[in-house]
């Protein structure tokens, strides 16, 4: 079970805010540790973020959860593991490479190719807030959760409700 970071487990806006670089962990993430023990499922990260961002996020996630949520280094995939979004590919979201060109994140228009890193895709899920992050042919492996903005969308500073999908996993 692989999780995206920005907008899924941590706040995307916390990183975009500038120099402060505060990691806001999504409410409810701490429940993953108890709900998904390592004897049942292996947890990992697949993000378009840089290794520096990943390291800061993992430290904040561990502090929030009271222990390491992602103990297997081989299951921590970052920007170097992604691929450029193929022209015309939208991962089922209706977005295309050309429609994303105006997006301020167009330089980071990537997909997360699961088949490149995992042999049996019937045993792999990617939990992400962006539907266009699945590689062509891998839409069935994507579980989309609502994007989380650190509570800035009305839930207060760093607050807001927990994502109901996280404990349901």
Image: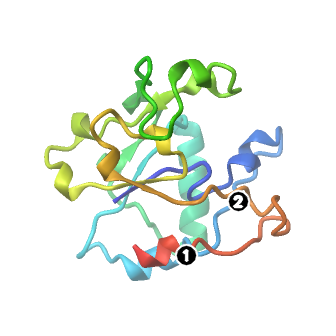
Residue 53 lies, in percent from the top left, at 59, 42
Which of the image's four quarters has the N terminus?
Answer: bottom left
Earlier in the chain: of badge 1 and badge 2, it is 2
Image-based side of 117 in relation to 167, left or right: left
x and y percentages locating residue 129 in the rendered image = 54, 52
Q: Name the residue furthest front.
A: 94
Q: Which residue is mark 2?
A: 24
Badge 1 crowding class, 10 Å Cα cut-off, few under 14, some 14 to 19, many 20 or more, is few
Question: Quick one: SS at disc 2?
Answer: loop
Q: Disc 1 on helix, strand or loop?
A: loop
Q: Is residue 128 above or below residue 64?
A: above
User: Which quarter of the rendering shows the C terminus?
Assistant: bottom left
**Residue 10 placement (x, y as % from top left):** 62, 56
Residue most extreme to the bottom = 34
Relative to residue 133, is residue 123 depicted above or below? Answer: below
What label sits on residue 43 in the rendered view?
A: none
Residue at horizontal 64%, vertical 72%? 27
């Amino acid at each position: 079970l692989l999780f995206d970071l920005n907008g899924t487990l941590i706040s995307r806006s916390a990183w975009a805010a500038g120099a402060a670089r505060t990691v806001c962990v999504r409410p409810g993430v701490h429940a993953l540790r108890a709900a998904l023990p390592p004897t049942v499922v292996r947890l990992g990260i697949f993000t378009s973020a840089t290794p520096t961002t990943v390291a800061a996020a993992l430290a904040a996630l561990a502090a929030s959860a009271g222990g390491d949520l992602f103990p297997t280094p081989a299951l921590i995939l970052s920007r170097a593991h992604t691929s450029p979004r193929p022209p015309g590919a939208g991962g089922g979201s209706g977005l295309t490479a050309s429609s994303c060109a105006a997006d301020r994140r167009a330089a980071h228009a990537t997909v997360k190719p699961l088949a490149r890193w995992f042999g049996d895709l019937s045993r792999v899920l990617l939990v992400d807030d962006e539907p266009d992050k699945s590689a062509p042919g891998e839409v069935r492996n994507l579980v989309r959760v609502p994007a989380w903005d650190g509570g800035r969308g009305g839930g207060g500073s760093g607050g807001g409700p927990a994502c109901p999908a996280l404990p349901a996993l």
